[in-house]
Image (cartoon, rainbow, N blue to C red):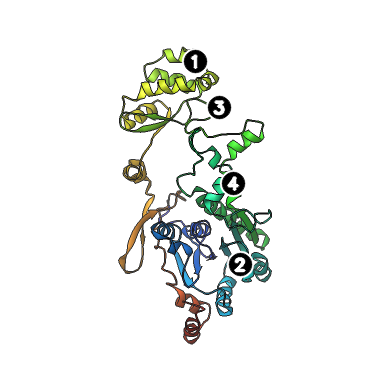
């Protein structure tokens, strides 16, 4: 049994040139696995620091465990300092506006020519090959242009976004996954890799099953709110006495068991519901039956009853209810990120465990430029040179 937190990437050095979520999130995933991560910011900081309370939450959520250096990369001296940092790095991560890193001489082609062992991850909005390669891209644009919004929401209402920046977060994790694969490959070949992904491609992959169905000849999917187009009851939102649950019992064995558990055996033989195809065709009547069966029970009572009988169900919980749920408490997912001067804030830790090692106690996200002097000194700048960089505005 592991006695300390797992840190398989100890000794790996990462330079994070990213902003907002996708790039910084990929770099933080590596930090949580033990990598040393340097966040390179402009003297005014990551753009997320300037968009209010939610932007501050982005910084806290996706920059823990890093050190921050503030450099003006538009200046020769600022770029020189960044290059010194990169010369010691194993990984560079960036999701800046298209063309920015290349214009600064910090793009993948230039850096990998100088540093062949470097693993370079770029995350863009729409990829590097198509006509939209130069467009800025946020999570919401990828949701729109990947088809995700077209299948999200009620059928008689406008398209809806997913309630959280899901594509950005998924791009962070998939980007980190690709970096890990490239680092493993480097151990065998001695050569790094250039990794290129986009929010659009990630958003498509989040819908892999639906796309596989459509590419296989199914009708174009549309919004239907809850439920699934080909199975019933599947992903149904059912009102209870004190809230809502979600329910899936479309396999024949599960549907028959549901009917027995609720004391409604006659429903299993009802011609309207005798097969999955019939239940799909009679979805309106089926939903009325589900409401009739469950609306007199509390949500937790429903879930406990169905779970005891191996039927998939879940309580629809608010954030406050999730925070108090026994499963979350037992998971240890909520960690205390600790900063200088005894400050701390609660955050989400790693969503997995390695060898049952405990969740690491992360450092909080750094202030912009909090480690500028120390990092410059580490790459050979003297105190006088650091002072000169500060006077010129190349460092802050």
The reply to whether the C-beta atoms of the residues labelled 2 and 4 are less than 8 Å apart is: no
First-in-chain label (1 vs 3): 3
- Label 4 to label 3: alpha-carbon separation: 24 Å
Question: Dot 3: within a 10 Å radius of its alpha carbon, few (fewer than 14), some, or many (20 or more) residues?
Answer: few
The reply to whether the C-beta atoms of the residues labelled 1 and 2 are less than 8 Å apart is: no
First-in-chain label (3 vs 2): 2
First-in-chain label (2 vs 4): 2
x then y, percent, for residue 114 = 66, 71
**Above-or-below relation of 304 to 368:** above
- Label 1 to label 2: alpha-carbon separation: 61 Å
Secondary structure of residue under mark 2:
helix
Q: Which residue is mark 2?
A: 101
First-in-chain label (4 vs 3): 4
Task: Say which residue appears at 33% left-offset and 33% top-offset.
Answer: 243
Nearer-the-camera pick, 34 or 222: 222
Task: Say which residue appears at 54% left-offset and 37% top-offset.
Answer: 151
x then y, percent, for residue 370 = 42, 72
Residue 230: which disc?
A: 3
Nearer-the-camera pick, 10 or 229: 229
The reply to whether the C-beta atoms of the residues labelled 3 and 2 are less than 8 Å apart is: no
**Above-or-below relation of 272 to 102:** above
- Label 1 to label 3: alpha-carbon separation: 15 Å
Q: Which residue is mark 4?
A: 145
**Above-or-below relation of 100 to 203:** below
Q: Which residue is mark 1?
A: 272
Task: Say which residue appears at 62% left-offset and 69% top-offset.
Answer: 106
Secondary structure of residue under mark 1:
loop
Secondary structure of residue under mark 4:
helix
Residue 235: which disc?
A: none
First-in-chain label (1 vs 2): 2
């Amino acid at each position: 049994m592991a006695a300390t937190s797992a840190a398989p990437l100890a000794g790996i050095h990462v330079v994070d040139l990213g902003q907002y979520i996708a790039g910084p999130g990929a770099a933080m995933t590596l930090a949580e696995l033990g990598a040393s991560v340097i966040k390179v910011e402009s003297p005014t900081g990551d753009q997320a620091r300037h968009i209010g309370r939610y932007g501050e939450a982005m910084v806290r959520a996706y920059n823990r465990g890093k050190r921050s250096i503030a450099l003006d990369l538009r200046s020769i001296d600022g770029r020189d300092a960044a290059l010194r940092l990169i010369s010691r790095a194993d990984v560079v991560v960036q999701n800046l506006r298209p063309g920015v890193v290349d214009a600064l001489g910090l793009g993948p082609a230039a850096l990998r020519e100088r540093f062949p062992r470097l693993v370079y991850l770029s995350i863009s909005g729409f990829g590097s090959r198509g006509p939209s390669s130069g467009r800025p891209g946020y999570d919401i644009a990828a949701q729109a242009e990947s088809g995700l919004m077209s299948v999200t929401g009620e059928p008689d209402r406008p398209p809806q976004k997913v309630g959280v920046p899901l594509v950005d977060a998924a791009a962070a994790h998939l980007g980190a996954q690709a970096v890990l694969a490239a680092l493993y490959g480097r151990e065998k070949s001695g050569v790094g890799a250039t990794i290129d992904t986009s929010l659009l491609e990630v958003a498509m992959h989040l819908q892999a099953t639906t796309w596989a169905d459509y590419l296989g000849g199914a009708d174009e999917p549309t919004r239907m709110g809850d439920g699934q187009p080909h199975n019933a009851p599947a992903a149904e939102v059912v009102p209870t006495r004190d809230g809502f649950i979600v329910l899936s019992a479309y396999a024949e064995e599960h549907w028959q068991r549901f009917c027995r558990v609720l004391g409604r055996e006659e429903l299993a033989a009802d011609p309207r519901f005798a097969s999955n195809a019939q239940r799909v065709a009679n979805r309106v009547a089926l939903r009325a039956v589900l409401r009739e069966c469950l609306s007199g029970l509390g949500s937790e009572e429903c879930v406990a009853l169905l779970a005891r009988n191996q039927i998939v169900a879940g309580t629809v919980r608010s954030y406050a209810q999730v925070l108090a749920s026994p499963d979350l408490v037992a998971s240890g997912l909520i960690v205390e990120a600790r900063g200088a001067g005894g400050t701390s804030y609660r955050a989400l830790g790693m969503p997995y465990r390695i060898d049952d090692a405990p969740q690491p106690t992360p450092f909080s996200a750094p202030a912009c430029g909090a480690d500028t002097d120390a990092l410059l000194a580490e790459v050979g700048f003297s105190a006088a040179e650091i002072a000169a960089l500060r006077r010129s505005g190349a460092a802050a």
